[in-house]
């Protein structure tokens, strides 16, 4: 079924928000997905440490690995990254680069031996991990599309409450007696309000709730001919982080079974800005244009719990861990500004923006995660390990502050499935001091084909119509070295290459009830390559 409805009125009736309701199914994916993280040793082996233990990264992976420690340890990890983005939009390629330096991980463990024959030792650990670095910039340029932003916004205004059920003009108009941004009945249709106030669209003749792009010309018979832009540009800048703080404990039972549990607090700060323009050929003197700017800052915290077990079978270790869903309390701060100039209207320039200090508060729950692990340990000289992670993105959930589900969850259940992650790692000790490591990680996309191919309409989050989707796996290739200066002090180095291909849309396709495409949006192929050099310094005592 094509999505022609908007989010339910309950978004505003029940949420404790400032003005807008934010969060769509693409935002849910952004909030739930993490990246390869941890110490340099762990990252050099692609994070495949679920059955190994003995590394501080296990506190946020399989905390049972804490029980394997036979000493206390403290370490810090530094991360230098370079993010390269390349967008090909209708044959025009644009490239952008960014660099970053962060403290990626800090952790310590405390070893407590016992005299018991059963519980040989129990260990306590704390870790800080940067789960995700949101830093990325990309720019899309096209030398003309059949449809522009005005066509999409006019469609949204005409079909805000289902196909053929639009918003009436008096509800879109800002005047002394009416502020449409405070109208709960509009169910979050802030982009059509902004579009109407800046002249992006106008009425079909004699119809009060159906609209068409204002960019075009009047034919001799009186009909309106909609124009196509001769150039489209979109610039997106993302920054921010997702950080995790873990406190955990592990038990060693007879050097055979290791048990562990940890509590995690996650903090996120995601910042987004976009700048979109359409240009139209009015005459030889001057072009008509449309401009749309958006800014968003999502901030919040979450709590979750992790449990795990590892079984030691001589050369083979097997592990299982479960991560509970993260329960987020989030606040969005955002604003938008738009402007049009239509020279056929005597150089009419119209501009407007959303109210200042706009925000919304809501809750979000990520999927839980299962981790199944195995490792083969070849004496003191080598080891091979593998992790398989499973997350059901169908279970992502938006709620208001009172716990009521939001209508966007219906789209999540339609458009998402399982995310699978495979991690493979190996380590060879050249001598007691020097080790060489390598790994591979593959993470599938949880988006179903209809969403990944934009065969369903993706509803704007507030005033932001831009989004990216992917059907291809994200791949990591990792290499690393380890060196022990003495029995206590060590250094690990890792190089990580990440490759992701997605489709970036300036706005969504729109569809009639019979599946016919009404407004077509051509995607740009967006390739993101991230190169990281990670250094860990540690001390065991």
Image (cartoon, helix red, strand yellow):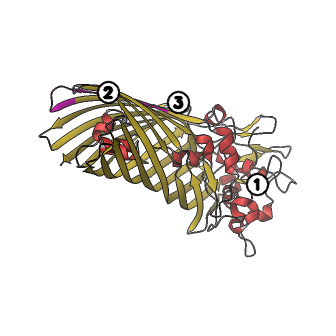
Comparing 274 with 264, the one in front is: 264
Q: Residue furthest bottom?
A: 176
Q: CA distance from mark 2 to mark 3?
A: 38 Å
In-image side of 484 versus 129 (left or right)? left
> x, y percentage for residue 534?
28, 41
* Image location (x, y in percent) of residue 382: 26, 25
Q: Quadrant location of residue 427?
A: top left
Is residue 174 positioned above or below 457 on the image?
below
Name the N-terminal-most of marks 2 and 3.
2
The answer to whether marks 2 and 3 mark residues whose Cβ atoms lie closer than 8 Å is: no
Q: Secondary structure at mark 3?
A: loop
Can residue 150 be seen at all in this image of the molecule? no
Identify the mark at residue 155; answer none if there is no mark.
none
Q: In the current view of this chain or complex, which residue is farthest to the left?
A: 486
Residue that carries the numbered disc 1 in the rendered image: 202
Find the residue positioned furthest to the top.
378
Residue at the image point whose x is 67% and y is 50% from the top: 408
The image's mark for residue 314 is 2
Give me the C-alpha separation between circle 3 and circle 1: 40 Å
**To which residue does mark 3 refer?**
472
Within-10-Å neighbours for mark 3: few <14, some 14–19, many 20+: some
Q: Position of residue 55 (x, y in %)?
A: 30, 41
Image quarter where the N terminus lies is top right
Kindly indicate whether the residue at mark 1 contacts the one at mark 3 (C-beta within 8 angstroms): no
């Amino acid at each position: 079924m094509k999505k022609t409805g908007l989010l339910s009125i309950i978004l505003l009736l029940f949420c404790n928000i400032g003005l807008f309701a934010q969060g769509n199914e693409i935002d849910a994916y952004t909030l739930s997905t993490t990246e390869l993280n941890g110490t340099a040793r762990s990252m050099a082996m692609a994070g495949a440490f679920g059955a190994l233990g003995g590394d501080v990264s296990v506190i946020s992976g399989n905390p049972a690995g804490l029980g394997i420690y036979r000493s206390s340890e403290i370490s810090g990890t530094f991360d230098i990254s370079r993010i390269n983005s390349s967008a090909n939009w209708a044959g025009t390629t644009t490239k952008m680069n960014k660099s970053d330096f962060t403290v990626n991980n800090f952790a310590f463990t405390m070893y407590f031996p016992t005299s018991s024959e059963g519980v040989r030792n129990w260990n306590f650990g704390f870790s800080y991990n940067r789960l995700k670095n949101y830093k990325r910039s990309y720019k899309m340029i096209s030398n003309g599309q059949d449809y522009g932003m005005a066509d999409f916004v006019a469609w949204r205004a005409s079909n805000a409450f289902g196909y053929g059920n639009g918003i009436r003009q008096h509800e879109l108009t800002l005047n002394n007696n009416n502020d449409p941004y405070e109208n709960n009945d509009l169910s979050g249709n802030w982009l059509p309000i902004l579009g109407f106030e800046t002249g992006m669209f106008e009425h079909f003749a004699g119809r009060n709730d159906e609209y068409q792009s204002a960019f075009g010309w009047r034919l001799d018979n009186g009909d309106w001919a909609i124009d196509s832009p001769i150039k489209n540009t979109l610039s997106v800048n993302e920054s921010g982080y997702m950080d995790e703080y873990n406190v955990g404990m592990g038990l060693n039972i007879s050097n055979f079974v290791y048990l562990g549990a940890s509590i995690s607090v996650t903090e996120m700060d995601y910042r987004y800005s976009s700048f979109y323009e359409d240009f139209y050929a009015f005459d030889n003197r001057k072009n008509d244009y449309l401009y749309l700017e958006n800014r968003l800052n999502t901030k919040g915290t979450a709590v979750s719990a992790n449990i795990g077990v590892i079984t030691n079978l001589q050369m083979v270790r097997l592990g299982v861990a479960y991560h509970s869903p993260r329960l987020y309390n989030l606040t969005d701060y955002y604003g938008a500004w738009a402007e049009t100039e239509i020279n056929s209207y005597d150089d009419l320039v119209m501009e407007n923006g959303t109210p200042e200090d706009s925000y919304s508060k809501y809750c979000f729950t990520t999927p839980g995660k299962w981790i199944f692990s195995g490792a083969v340990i070849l004496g003191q000289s080598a080891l091979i390990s593998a992790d398989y992670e499973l997350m059901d993105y169908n279970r992502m959930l938006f709620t208001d502050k009172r716990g009521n589900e939001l209508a966007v969850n219906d789209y999540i259940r339609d458009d998402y499935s399982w995310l699978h992650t495979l991690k493979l790692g190996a380590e060879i000790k050249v001598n007691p001091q020097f080790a060489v490591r390598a790994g591979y990680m593959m993470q599938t996309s949880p988006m179903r084909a209809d969403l990944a191919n934009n065969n369903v309409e993706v509803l704007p989050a507030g005033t932001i119509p831009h989004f990216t989707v992917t059907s291809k796996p994200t791949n990591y290739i990792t290499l690393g070295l380890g060196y022990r200066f003495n029995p206590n002090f060590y250094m690990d180095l890792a190089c990580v290459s990440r490759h992701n291909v997605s489709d970036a849309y300036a706005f969504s396709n729109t569809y009639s009830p019979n599946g016919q495409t009404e407004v077509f949006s051509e995607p740009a192929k967006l390739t993101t390559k991230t190169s990281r050099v990670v250094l860990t310094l540690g001390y065991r005592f």
